[in-house]
Image (cartoon, helix red, strand yellow):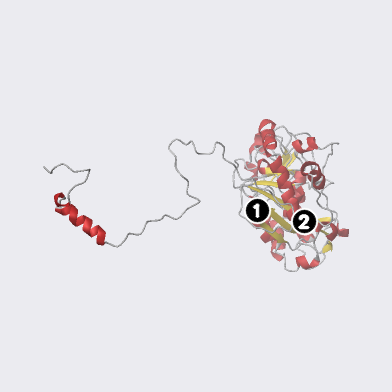
Amino acid sequence: MPPPATDGKVDAKDIAPNWKKLKEEEANAPPKEKKTIPFNPNKKRKFNDGAHEPAIKKTRKVEIPVTGADKETGELTPIIAIDCEYVGVGDEGKDDNLARVSIVNEEGKIVYDKFVRPKMKVVDYRTAVSGIRPANLLNASRFEDVQKEVHKIMEGRIVVGHALHNDMRVLCLSHPRKLTRDTYKCKTIRQMINPPVAHPSLKLLASKILGIDIQQGEHDSIIDARVALRIYLNLKKKWEEEIKSDRMGNCLPLMGGNQSTPSSTSSSSQSAPTSYTNPLALPHNLSYSHSFTLNSHFSRAHIHISNESEQMSLEQSNRVRSLLAQIPAMGYRKEMGETECAICMGELDAGERVRYLPCMHLFHVECVDDWLIRSFNCPSCLEPVDSTMLSSFTAHNTLKLSEIASSSASN
C-alpha cells in the first residue's frame, strides 16, 4: 500500500510504470486536430420533451400570378386550369376553331401552351379579343395531336375553367362532371354577384371576387386560366362543401333540352359494356331510328369548304348523317345507367331522346349528332366512331355499308 500523499500530491516514484509510459507518449505525440461537424440548416434538432417545437406549423401560401409575362413552367398537379382561344371560320367567320390551348397547374405555373392549326380556313382571326395573329399559326401543332395531349393531361384530374363547355366543344373532348369546376356555372359564385347576372363573364368575376381588372385588350389564355384557378381556390372550401351537400356544384345545364336544375350528379364513366356487337341485343328492346334529328341551336345548313387544309367535307358530313340514321335513338330511362350527357354536362331527364354510340356511351341526340358532324371520335373515350359503326352494325343496317366504306376510303 503506497504511503499517504502529502498536500494532495503523489511522489513520482510511486506512479505505476505503465502510467508513466503513457504520459511520456502523450507528451511526445503531435497535437490532435479537433473534429468539426459542418452546420446543416435542413437537419432538425431532436428534443425529448418536444417543448421547443413550434405549436403551429406554417403552410406555404402560393400566390398565383395573373400576368401573362410570368412564363414559369411546372409539373402536373391533381388540379389544373385550362383556357382556349378561338378564331372564326366558316361563313362570315361565325363558327369557332381552336387556335390556342393553355393549361396551368395548381400553383399557376404553365404545364402546356400551344398554338393549334385550325381545321378550316380562317376567316376572322379575332385578334382584338383572341390575341391570335397569322404568324402564330404558321408552325402551329396539328389539332389531332393537341387533342390527344390535352385529353391525356386532363384524365383523372380536376379541371378548372370558365365556360368550359365552349372549350370542350372546340377541343372535341369531354370531361366527367364530378371533375369539372366551371366558374361560369357555379351556384356559389353566382350568389356572390350583386346585382345577379345569369351568365357572368370572367372579367366580371375577376373584378367582383378578386378585385383585379383583366381583358383590357387582347385576351391571354394563360391569364384567363390563372384567374379562373384563383377564383376556384379562393372559394374551394365552400364550393366543395356545396358539391358534397347537394351535388349541384357545377349547376345548370346550358345547352338544348330541358333546362331544369339538376338534383344529382354522377360520373359519366359509370360501369358499362366496353363492346357493342349486336344492337338488337341491347336491354330495353331498343329500336332503330332512321330519322336524323338536329336541334335548331346546333344545325349547320352548310359546311364551308375552303382549301386543302380543311379536313371536314360535305362528303364526310353526308356519310356521318347516313351512319347516324343507323344508331338507336330512344327515350331516356334511369335504368340505362348514365345520368348526364358528357358533351353538354347536363342531366339526362326521363323521356329525353338519347343516342348510344357503339362504345356504349350515351348522349343527348342533339348533342351527339352535332358532335359527330365535327368530329369522328366519341367525346368520352375518343374511340373512332366512324370505323366502329361500320364494323358493329354490318349485320343490322338497312343501308349499303359497302358504299359508305368506299366513301370512307376515298376520304
What distance separates the C-alpha of mark 1 from that of mark 2?
Answer: 21 Å
Observer-side mark, 1 or 2, equals 2
Q: Is mark 2 on a helix, strand or loop?
A: loop
Quarter of the picture containing the N terminus is top left
Reading the chain from its start, which is encountered first: label 1 or label 2? 1
Residue occupying the point 71% across, 43% down: 232
Residue 261 visible from this viewpoint: yes
Which residue of the protein is positioned furthest toward the front in this rendering? 7
Left or right: where 210 falls relative to 28: right
Q: Residue 410 location in percent, x, y?
A: 71, 65
Residue 323 visible from this viewpoint: no
* Kind of residue at badge 1: His
Which residue of the protein is positioned furthest toward the left in this rendering? 1
* Residue tagged 1: 151
Residue occupying the point 87% across, 59% down: 91
Q: Residue 52 location in percent, x, y?
A: 50, 38
Left or right: where 103 falls relative to 192: left
Q: Residue 390 location in percent, x, y?
A: 66, 55
Q: Residue 328 location in percent, x, y?
A: 71, 44
* Residue tagged 2: 220
Q: Residues within 10 Å of mark 2 (few under 14, many from 20)?
A: many
Which residue occupies the foreground of this view, 68 or 103?
Answer: 68
Left or right: where 83 falls relative to 153: right
* Kind of residue at badge 2: Asp
Q: Residue 83 carries which label?
A: none
Which residue occupies the foreground of this view, 102 or 48?
Answer: 48
Quarter of the picture containing the C terminus is bottom right
